[in-house]
Image (cartoon, rainbow, N blue to C red):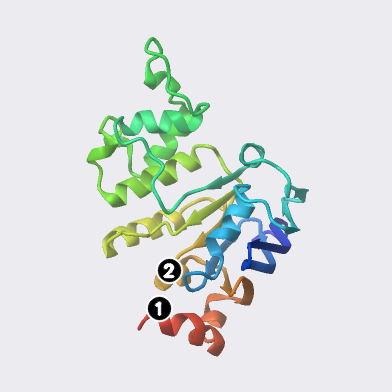
């Protein structure tokens, strides 16, 4: 794994009135890493993702992306620099096909005109991404007909089609069956190391299987950080997170 830093979060803080959701968060993600971010509900994980992605502006602190300060950059600027993100809630267009959703991912986000065939927007990167995630046989299926697991695969394919350098995964296994989680885990494990992963996930088996390093958020701060073995053996982490997760 590279010693280059893909993401650097330094002293990030965010409050909504009297509610403090992030307090002096420091986080470093190495280029090529598979970095897990865990914590109980309300720990501030999604708020931190929103600030990294540019959807929320921090009250203080800085964010660096491959050495470039992006704290004040817009979502679009960060996307163009190679920062991609998936969401807990689906952002797919259910009334069109898999092919058409993929075409949107590589375009400007607008529906094509009636005289421009959708398949002309599909390039080699899109087709290769669809094939990597097992979507080639489903290209002309309506998104509304897909299983929940396949929807997650399509969401991942759409972000990967943008060729991100860093991919933020926000609970990618949410709502998936055990077998679907296993499929998704293998797909994420097979991604090239040119794509750095930072993942929020409540499925501890998945986090431990995929991560090189794990950070634990608690009450808006990084409470602990280490290898999967170190986090699994950490008494404080078990008390605030792992024990509750298996109640």
Q: Residue at x 33, y 34 (%)?
A: 98
Q: Secondary structure at mark 2?
A: loop
Q: Residue 53's x, y, as percent?
A: 60, 49
Which quadrant, please, contains the N terminus? bottom right
Circle 1 packing at 10 Å, graded few (<14), some (14-19), many (20+), is some
Which quadrant, please, contains the C terminus? bottom left
Q: Residue 141's x, y, as percent?
A: 25, 33
In depth, the one of 161 and 58 nearer the eye is: 58
Q: Residue at x 53, y 59 (%)?
A: 46
User: Residue extending furthest bottom?
Assistant: 235
Q: Residue at x 29, y 37 (%)?
A: 143
In depth, the one of 247 and 213 nearer the eye is: 247
Q: Residue 246's x, y, as percent?
A: 37, 81
Return the residue at label 1. Answer: 245
Return the residue at label 2. Answer: 202
Q: Residue at x 69, y 63 (%)?
A: 13
Q: Secondary structure at mark 1?
A: helix
């Amino acid at each position: 794994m590279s010693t280059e830093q893909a993401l650097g979060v330094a002293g990030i803080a965010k409050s909504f009135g009297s509610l403090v959701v992030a307090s002096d968060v420091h986080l470093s993600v190495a280029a090529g890493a598979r970095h897990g971010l865990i914590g109980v509900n309300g720990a501030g994980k999604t708020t931190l993702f929103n600030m990294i992605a540019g959807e929320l502006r921090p009250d203080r602190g800085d964010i660096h992306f491959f050495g470039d300060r992006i704290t004040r950059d817009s979502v679009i600027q960060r996307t163009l620099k190679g920062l991609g993100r998936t969401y807990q809630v689906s952002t797919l267009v259910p009334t069109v096909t898999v092919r058409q959703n993929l075409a949107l991912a590589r375009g400007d986000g607008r529906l094509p005109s009636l005289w421009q065939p959708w398949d002309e927007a599909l390039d080699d990167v899109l087709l290769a991404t669809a094939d990597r995630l097992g979507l080639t046989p489903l290209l002309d299926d309506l998104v509304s007909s897909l299983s929940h697991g396949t929807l997650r695969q399509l969401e991942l394919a759409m972000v990967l089609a943008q060729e991100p350098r860093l991919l933020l995964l926000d609970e990618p296994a949410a709502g998936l069956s055990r077998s679907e989680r296993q499929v998704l885990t293998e797909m994420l494990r097979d991604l090239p190391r040119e794509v750095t992963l930072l993942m929020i996930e409540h499925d501890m088996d998945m986090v431990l299987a995929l991560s090189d390093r794990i950070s634990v958020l608690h009450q808006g701060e990084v409470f602990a950080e280490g290898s999967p073995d170190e986090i699994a053996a950490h008494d404080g982490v078990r008390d605030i997170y792992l024990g509750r997760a298996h109640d």
